[in-house]
Image (tube, helix red, strand yellow):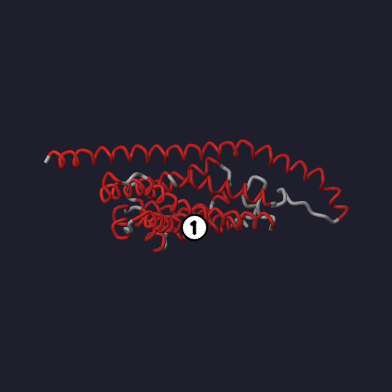
Amino acid sequence: MDRDMSDTTTLPRLLLRDRVIILSAIAGLTGLAWLYLLHLGQAMPGMAMTDMAMTDMAMPAMAMTGMTMPMSPPWTLAGVTLTFAMWAVMMVGMMLPSAAPMILTFAALHRRKAGRSERVLPTLFFAAGYLAVWSAFSLLATVLQWGLDRSSLLSPMLTTTSAAFGGGLFVLAGAYQLSPLKQACLHRCRSPFAFLFNRWRDGWTGALRMGVEHGAYCLGCCWLLMALLFVVGVMNLLWVAAIALFVFGEKLLPGGAWIARVSGVAMAGYGAWLLMQV
């Protein structure tokens, strides 16, 4: 009798402790990610001015020799690695906070199933699976940035130089916001308990797999919103924060599905306006 009462009082304390640990970890990682982005944001204007100054000085000589000069440094292995790191850290700062309810729900369900014998380690595997999906997206974004840069479609401030590309991307993003696939992915992101109940797998491998599955739905929900950074500025931190808040609202606020639909109409309309300026 006393042991049963002890178990029933200990479990809530363990759940509360887990929530404090997990929320602290999410806040800490998000804060570190944003500090890194702020550091890059402060360094980029000087780098961009240096690139443009070098181009202006070298242009007459290059015109005489028929040579062209890229607006950004060569894509060395170090450059690619730093670009990938920028995108990966940015995805942590933007997407991890909106995944907090899912991570907390997983931790609570796992604690109830496993009892006091399990720590928060399975939750780390769940979060790692989620972030692995966004790391894969970061790799694709790095490749896309390289392609745009090599095609002279990217400015030193990492915004597209093509109004047609920017307008088309906004129209595509707006249309996707209204699509059934977007709504299906958003529904699963907004329903942590239903998602975990239907896809529960035991063990750390199960936690990792569930994290990957949740990350895939989240990616399906938000990938085109992330691609809009190539239009508004990859390192424009005001827009980065605005998109992060928008994703947070879509996934967590009441009426998130309608937020997606209304924003889709607005994005498509703005994209059409941009295309008319071409």
Q: Position of residue 191 (x, y in %)?
A: 32, 53
Q: Residues within 10 Å of mark 1 (few under 14, many from 20)?
A: many
Disc 1 on helix, strand or loop? helix
Q: Quadrant of the N terminus?
A: top left
The residue depicted at 58 percent of the width and 55 percent of the height is 166
For the view shown, which residue lies furthest in the bottom direction? 180
For the view shown, which residue lies furthest in the right direction? 64
Left or right: 61 as drawn, with respect to 87? right
Q: Is residue 49 above or below residue 154?
A: above
Q: Nearer the viewer, residue 221 or 124?
A: 124
The residue depicted at 50 percent of the width and 37 percent of the height is 32
Q: Nearer the viewer, residue 10 or 89?
A: 10
Left or right: 20 as drawn, with respect to 63? left
For badge 1, the amino acid type reads Ala
Q: Position of residue 119 (x, y in %)?
A: 34, 44
The residue depicted at 45 percent of the width and 47 percent of the height is 95
Q: Is residue 275 above or below residue 87?
A: below
Q: Which residue is mark 1?
A: 173
Left or right: 215 as drawn, with respect to 104? right
The residue depicted at 82 percent of the width and 46 percent of the height is 58
Q: Position of residue 237 (x, y in %)?
A: 54, 41
